Amino acid sequence: MASPPPWGLTTLQVMNVMVCRDDHPEVREVIASHHCIERFRRRRRIRAPGVQAVADSLQDALSRADFTRWPPHWVLSERSTELWALVDDIAFPLTKTSDPGRWLAMTCLVRDNDAQLRTSRL
């Protein structure tokens, strides 16, 4: 049996991190995958132990996100994604689930301004 991550997330705890929306014709709810939550914690540098601080911050981000079919210009990926949730410098590629209106955030991508500055200087 694998040991739990050091910050105390378990699969059962993260399954409940979801946001309900009523302002988009295709998106009724967004559920964050376990991988998405782990990446969000690392990339947003949330250091508080346990799942509550991550869940609160992630729910806030997804509740403010705009939905689009276009990835942000700073995302470099060959992967086809049907819908994106974008907020501030965060992008969540979304995958449709079998339940109409329910989308799964597969991961969390964060814009790396330092890398872009290094690239723009070349």
Image: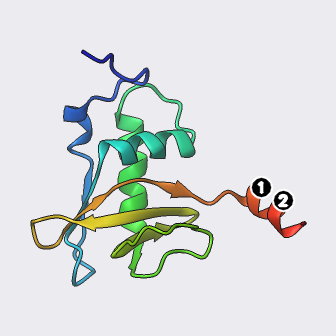
Q: Secondary structure at mark 1?
A: helix
Indicate the quadrant containing the N terminus: top left, top right, bottom left or bottom right: top left
- Look at mark 2 in the image and give the residue it sits on: 118
What is the three-letter code of the residue carrying label 1? Answer: Asp
Up-down: is 15 above or below 2? below
Up-down: is 23 above or below 114? below
Q: Is residue 44 visible?
A: no
What is the three-letter code of the residue carrying label 2? Answer: Arg
Q: Is residue 106 left or right of residue 113?
A: left
Indicate the quadrant containing the C terminus: top left, top right, bottom left or bottom right: bottom right
Name the residue: 43% across, 59% down.
Answer: 61
Q: How far apart in space, not on screen, are marks 1 and 2 (Cα)?
A: 6 Å
In the foreground, 1 or 31: 1
Residue 37 marker: none
In the foreground, 106 or 6: 106
- Residue 53 x, y percent position in the rendering: 41, 37
In the foreground, 60 or 75: 75
Q: Is residue 51 visible?
A: yes
In the foreground, 34 or 67: 34
- In this picture the colour scheme is rainbow
Q: Secondary structure at mark 2?
A: helix
- Residue 99 x, y percent position in the rendering: 9, 66
Residue contact between numbered discs 1 and 2, judged by CB atoms under 8 Å: yes
**What is the residue that sits farthest to the right in this orientation?**
121
- Residue 50 x, y percent position in the rendering: 38, 27
Name the residue: 31% across, 42% down.
Answer: 34
Residue 114 marker: 1
